[in-house]
């Protein structure tokens, strides 16, 4: 992942604020690519950069889904006007690596971007793996996830069957489907994907 601090991808559906943020940043020698929404960004997917996104309900989730589809993770900084603590916590839990309250000066924003880049270096690949693994796990049925949980706990097909009240043969079928949907060749691959998706700790 080669995020570039000088390339800022701005997503904000408010035209006036988008213009004022772009102006503030370009005057600080930062290249800004403004987009109205995630759909517009998807049509011109960037190669590198940091994403500054206006924090709206579901926006970060939608952005991360798009990253999973493109197989590319960029550091996300969320922003809004007068955010409360709960909103900031939710954005960070959803996947943002920092949060800013707008308005902010270009100098303050530069400091935030530098911090974000330092964190992104550590988080980038792990976060991308987690995003990709979650996208795979989402393909599984509830029963296939339960079988994956049993497999990860080291249980045999017979024991998983007893635990779920199904036959060992049915466990075998769910297990084969689960491996197929995860794109896993072996049980150990499936367990690694579950760990990366933060299903197992």
Image (cartoon, rainbow, N blue to C red):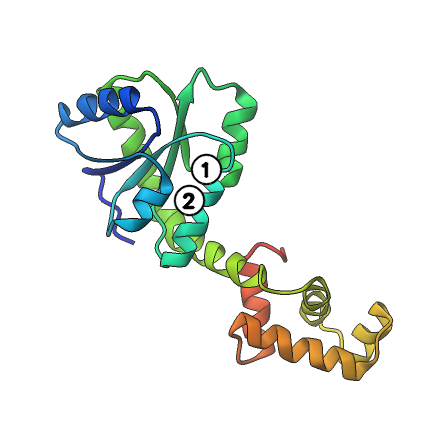
**Residue 99 percent across, percent down from the top left:** 41, 28
Residue at numbered disc 2: 63
Res 15 quadrant in image:
top left
Residue 59 marker: 1
Please, is residue 180 above or below residue 193 in the view?
below
Give me the residue at 32% from left, 38% from top: 51
**Residue 160 percent across, percent down from the top left:** 79, 73
Give me the residue at 80% from left, 82% from top: 168
Quadrant position of the C terminus in the picture: bottom right
Give me the residue at 44% from left, 29% from top: 55
Callout 1 touching callout 2 (CB < 8 Å): yes
Give me the residue at 33% from left, 49% from top: 42
Q: Residues within 10 Å of mark 1 (few under 14, many from 20)?
A: some
Please, is residue 121 above or below residue 103 in the view?
below
Q: Nearer the viewer, residue 106 or 45?
A: 45
Q: Is residue 182 left or right of residue 11?
A: right
Q: Is residue 34 left or right of residue 162?
A: left
Callout 2 secondary element: helix
């Amino acid at each position: 992942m080669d995020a570039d601090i000088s390339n800022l991808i701005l997503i904000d559906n408010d035209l006036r604020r988008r213009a004022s943020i772009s102006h503030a940043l370009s005057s600080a020698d930062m290249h800004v690519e403004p987009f109205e929404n995630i759909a517009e960004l998807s049509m011109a997917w960037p190669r590198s950069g940091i994403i500054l996104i206006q924090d709206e309900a579901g926006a970060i989730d939608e952005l991360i889904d798009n990253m999973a589809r493109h197989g590319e993770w960029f550091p996300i900084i969320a922003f809004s006007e007068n955010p409360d603590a709960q909103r900031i916590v939710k954005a960070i839990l959803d996947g943002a690596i920092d949060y800013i309250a707008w308005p902010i000066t270009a100098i303050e924003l530069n400091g935030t971007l530098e911090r974000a880049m330092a964190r992104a270096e550590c988080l980038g690949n792990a976060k991308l793996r987690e995003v990709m693994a979650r996208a795979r796990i989402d393909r599984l049925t509830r029963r296939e996830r339960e079988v994956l949980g049993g497999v990860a706990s080291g249980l045999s097909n017979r024991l998983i069957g007893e635990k779920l009240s199904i036959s060992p043969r049915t466990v075998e079928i769910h297990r084969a489907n689960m491996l197929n949907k995860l794109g896993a060749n072996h049980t150990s691959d499936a367990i690694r994907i579950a760990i990366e998706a933060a299903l197992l700790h």
